[in-house]
Image: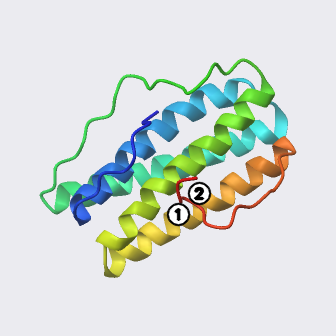
Amino acid sequence: MPHRAPTSSGPTQALADALTAEYAAIWAYGVIGVHLADSARQAARNAEAAHRARRDALILQLSANGGQVPPDQAGYALPYPVTDRASALRLAVEVEERTAGHWRAALPHTTGADRNRALAALTDCALRATRWRRTAGVTPITIPFPGRPV
């Protein structure tokens, strides 16, 4: 998972950074889902599908606009070992918060439809992070400014 802060310097770079975060989120959900069961596992599948849809849309958009499409990596380093339900839920929260941070960073660099997409993605990530916090029993369930570095 990318540990670096978003480096956006324009709309194309901001969206490319968001794409990299989406790649990492998809990869992480493969690890997360293995350690969950029942409704939590289904929530992980749904989250992965949402990140895949955003990834696909970004690849098409960047390609159509002649932008550089960053490649996906074969794997991503996790911030800690994921060995059980608790660590999987903690990672799910972190994945959504990190991805939200990349979308939040894209907001000042985008306008119009791109800005609307970035805001929708930020909102989706914040909602999923809240649901994961609730599932994990983490308080507070919500944070005041999703995607903002702590």
> Is 57 above or below relative to 72?
below
> Is 3 above or below relative to 118?
above
Q: Is residue 76 visible?
A: yes
121 horizontally vs 2: left or right: right
Q: State the residue position of label 1.
A: 122
- Image disc number at residue 106: none
Q: How many marks?
A: 2
| Residue type (three-letter) at the residue carrying disc 2 | Cys
Coordinates of residue 3 in the picture (x, y in percent):
44, 36
| Residue type (three-letter) at the residue carrying disc 1 | Leu
Residue 140 or 40: which is nearer the viewer? Answer: 140
> Are the residues tagged 1 and 2 within 8 Å (C-beta)?
yes
Can you name the residue that lies furthest to the bottom here? Answer: 112
For image coordinates 62% across by 47% down, the residue present is 47
**C-alpha distance separating marks 1 and 2:** 5 Å
Coordinates of residue 88 in the picture (x, y in percent):
71, 30
For image coordinates 38% across by 52% down, the residue present is 18
Indicate the secondary structure of the residue bearing disc 1: helix
Q: State the residue position of label 2.
A: 125
Q: Is residue 36 visible?
A: no
40 horizontally vs 117: left or right: right
Indicate the secondary structure of the residue bearing disc 2: helix
For image coordinates 55% across by 46% down, the residue present is 49
For image coordinates 34% across by 28% down, the residue present is 73
